[in-house]
Image: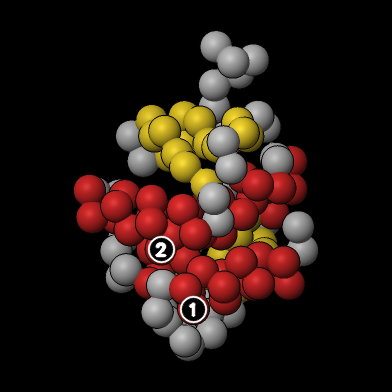
Amino acid sequence: MEREDYQAVVDLTSEALGLRKPMPVRVKNVLKGMANKQYITIPKWLENYDELYQIYYAIHETCHYLMHNKNHKDKFKKDEDRALALWGMSIIRKKAYPKSLCCNGQSIKNIPGGIKNGA
């Protein structure tokens, strides 16, 4: 996905969750994504994974921004679940990040650290 694609995901998710202010997205060669008061950073390495995982990642960072929440405690997870449902996605977590992801009932296969080959 390109920066504009991530921006569309962030904009649509933000609007659906009640935030009208646009949040700029940038794609950079960084180890992990982040959300702060000025922008959302998406790591370039995501291009190696399924496009639906890339969408998940943009939603995850959008939730950090929208919920003013830097941790992954229960409230964040509940808010993230609600945002993912808007996109037809569901998550089984290994702590905070996906052990597996589904979109419209179909497993998303190429995710980092996910369940491999249906195991």
Name the residue: 38% across, 30% down: 94
Q: Is residue 114 among the parts visible in the rendering?
A: yes
Question: Which residue type does callout 1 highlight?
Answer: Glu
Q: Residue furthest right?
A: 2
Q: Which residue is mark 1?
A: 15
Q: Is residue 60 among the parts visible in the rendering?
A: no
Q: How is the image coloured?
A: secondary structure
In the picture, the quarter occupied by the N terminus is: bottom right
- Tell me where residue 114 appears, x and y as whole percent: 54, 27
Question: Which residue type does callout 2 highlight?
Answer: Cys
Q: How many marks?
A: 2
Q: Secondary structure at mark 2?
A: helix
Q: Nearer the viewer, residue 27 or 5?
A: 5
Name the residue: 47% across, 42% down: 90
How would you rate the neighbour count of disc 2 (Cα within 10 Å): few for under 14, some for 14-19, many for 20 or more?
many
Name the residue: 38% across, 56% down: 82
Q: Which residue is mark 2?
A: 63
Relative to 96, is 45 on the left or the right?
right
Q: Nearer the viewer, residue 63 or 85?
A: 85
Q: Nearer the viewer, residue 42 or 20?
A: 20
In the picture, the quarter occupied by the C terminus is: top right
Q: Earlier in the sequence, mark 1 or mark 2?
A: 1
